[in-house]
Image (spheres, rainbow, N blue to C red):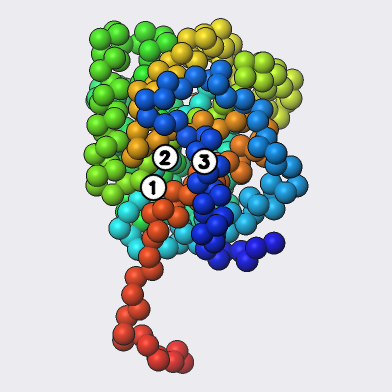
Amino acid sequence: MADLGRPASKKSNAKEAKFLSRLVVAPDSNFRFSKRKPDQTFGWDKEGAAVELAELLARIDLLQQKLAAESRQSLLVVLQAIDASGKDGTLRGVFGPLSASGVQVSNFKAPTGAELSHDYLWRGHARTPATGEIAVWNRSHYEDVLIVRVKNLVPEERWRRRYRHIREFEQMLADEGTRIVKINLHISNEQQRARLQDRIDDPNKRWKFRVGDLEDRKLWPKFMKAYEVAINETSTERAPWYVVPAEHKWVRNLAVAHILHHALTEMDPQLPPDDPAMLGVVVE
Ligand code: ADP
């Protein structure tokens, strides 16, 4: 096993970048879910992936501490995906082990009255990460071009303008020092069916199931279309989308950890210089 917490070598960073080029959606690339396999394993095996994930999490932990100590830049991770795709499991498996003081998770539920009485970016803007922090959005402002589009919650002329607003909002955050990565967890229609059924059958998971999930499931083709449009319209150099194969939970977690590690490595946070007054001080 590699030294935990040590920075990764240049070679392994290059390997990581190459791997991520298979997940990222390049701007103007006409992304389609049908071009990707949701049960892809990249030739990994489960045991090896568990070891690699532990190593990566140790490195991410150190990078996160440096990010906090440096306190000049921030990271926003958008986790946006269809029901039962594994958002909660990803939060537990990849972000759960990190220091709670430096990682803020926000859940974007159906908007409240106060949220509805503001513009749709208001609630997200209030939850952007402060310098030194990582914010993870469990669902996001993308709901306002996904469920809102699929269910006609506002007139088309309004949601159509939102792709441009979102690109500009994210560009502004990036200009002001926030790194942005956006992650979509990709599962098949059959996998969603099986997972929803499991939620009904397993008493420990039943609380996760809402009858409304079945109504949303009937709208699967419309959701897929809305996701494809949103991803194509808003995957930019500064705020790229990654589509992660999520049918195997161990593949999903390792892939998301690589996305996080790669972003933090590129941000390259630096520890502040030593205070000369501290040098040589002996604590009694
Ligand atoms: P989750 O499915 O994320 O575990 P919930 O079961 O509470 O959590 O679902 C949250 C619901 O809120 C989802 O159906 C989502 O589409 C909906 N939602 C989130 N944001 C909005 C929005 N801006 N407008 C309408 N519905 C939204």
Q: Horizontal and vertical percent for residue 134? A: 41, 49
Mark 3 residue type: Leu
Picture residue at 36% right of the left edge, 56% below the top: 132
Q: Residues within 10 Å of mark 3 (few under 14, many from 20)?
A: some
Say the numbered circle drawn on residue 181.
Answer: 2
Q: Is residue 103 visible?
A: no
Give yes or no for contact between labels 2 and 1 (Cβ–Cβ under 8 Å): yes
Q: Is residue 244 left or right of residue 148?
A: right
Mark 1 residue type: Leu
Q: Quadrant of the N terminus?
A: bottom right
Q: CA distance from mark 1 to mark 3?
A: 18 Å
Q: CA distance from mark 2 to mark 1?
A: 8 Å
Q: Earlier in the sequence, mark 2 or mark 3?
A: 3
The picture quadrant where one finds residue 101 is: bottom left
Picture residue at 28% right of the left edge, 49% below the top: 177
Q: Earlier in the sequence, mark 1 or mark 3?
A: 3
Picture residue at 40% right of the left edge, 18% below the top: 229
Q: Which residue is mark 3?
A: 20
